[in-house]
Amino acid sequence: MELINQITASPLFGVFLTLIAYIIGTYINKKTGKVYFNNLLIAYIVVIGILLIFKIPVDNYNNGASIITNCLGPATAVLAISIYNQRKKVKENLLPIIVGTLSGSLASIISVVTLSKLLKLDWPTTASVIPKSVTTAIAVAVADSLGGYISIAAICVVITGCTGNILAPFFIKLFHLTDPVAQGLAIGTASHALGTSKAIELGEVQGAFSSIAITFAGIITVILTLIIFV
Amino acid sequence: MVSTMKALKELSIIVGVCLIGEVISQLLPFSFPPAVLSMLLMLLLFFTPLLKPEKIESVATLMLGNMVLFFIPSGVQIVKYTDIIKDSWWKLVIICLVSLVITFFVTGTTVMLTIKLMKRRKSNGTN
């Protein structure tokens, strides 16, 4: 046991385990091609499974894993490239984009807070679910600034995204969203990047507007939570 | 194949912009996620002659394509909150799902309405 503790205390262990889990998750996801074999979800199971089986303290894992978490900021910042590349579509459809992502993000926040009150969740847990519809990088930041738990925020983002990905075609029919712009914006606003992979399958317009919605809904959610809760 | 030096230059630009974003976010009187601020700063720079997307493109593409990797550690921290998960995992799932349906419906419907109104105004304008 002491040996395991010594090995895993090295920062290299956390980096190694995270990389291996990512590779396994992505491999299974590509091989099966199924949404519910989501690579992030599989990676979580691999890492948590190994920590629990070998009784490795999570702090040992974090020695190295924090190096990877520190790259999250730069990885979020480069999302700017995808908005910049879509600038023509954004300019032409600015009004539907703003109205859609604003009302959708507001509906998301209000419904989460209302449901959390009904189910008697405490504030830190509620704060962790509030950004469930935005992309993980922004969700983690929002949950953190609202006093939530970033890990629960990350898990809620994955639950919402996977479900959105699977159910998006059904929702489109159910709500009679005939316009591809509306379909794309609804998918991106409600279920961020995981939903967007389904939007891309539905068509080029849907894919583009879904990715536009990720960044707009993300920024709007940051601003709304600042206005409402701070 | 991108040369190592080019990749390192790209990486240093990205990290540099994020560092400035972090400084700005600390100077702000309210707490705004530094990562999002860096993203807005980066976007702003693209519209100036100072920085063009091509200057960071290959490293940025690599990061965007493997974004999931960076989220693994933050989700793993959930093992610290087993008591919350044990008590309320079903509440979290219900809230996520119900709110997902509501968000999807509200976004889609308002966009449909906005597009319809815009088309009507346009055709009125030409008449």
Image (cartoon, rainbow, N blue to C red):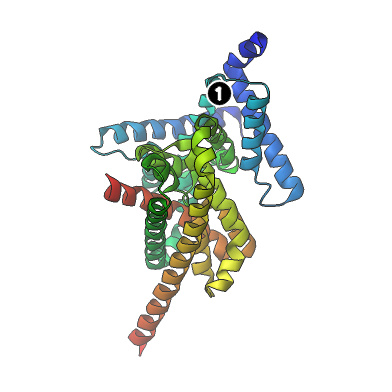
| Nearer-the-camera pick, A156 or A137 | A156
Q: How crowded is mark 1: few (under 14 residues within 10 Å), some or many (20 or more)?
A: many
Q: Is residue A103 above or below residue B126?
A: above
Identity, as a three-letter code, of the amino acid under mark 1 = Val
The image quadrant of residue A90 is bottom left
| Nearer-the-camera pick, B97 or A46 | B97
Q: Name the residue under label 1.
A: A58
Q: Where is residue B91 in the image (x, y as percent from the top left)?
A: 50, 49
Q: Is residue A112 above or below residue A144?
A: below
Would residue A46 be found to the left or right of residue A199 on screen? right
Which residue shows up at 62% across the image and 13% down it? A5
Which residue shows up at 51% across the image and 25% down it? A66
**Secondary structure found at label 1:** helix
Task: Look at the image and tell me in which quarter the N terminus of chain B lies.
Answer: top right
| Nearer-the-camera pick, A70 or B90 | B90
Q: Position of residue A137 (x, y in %)?
A: 47, 41
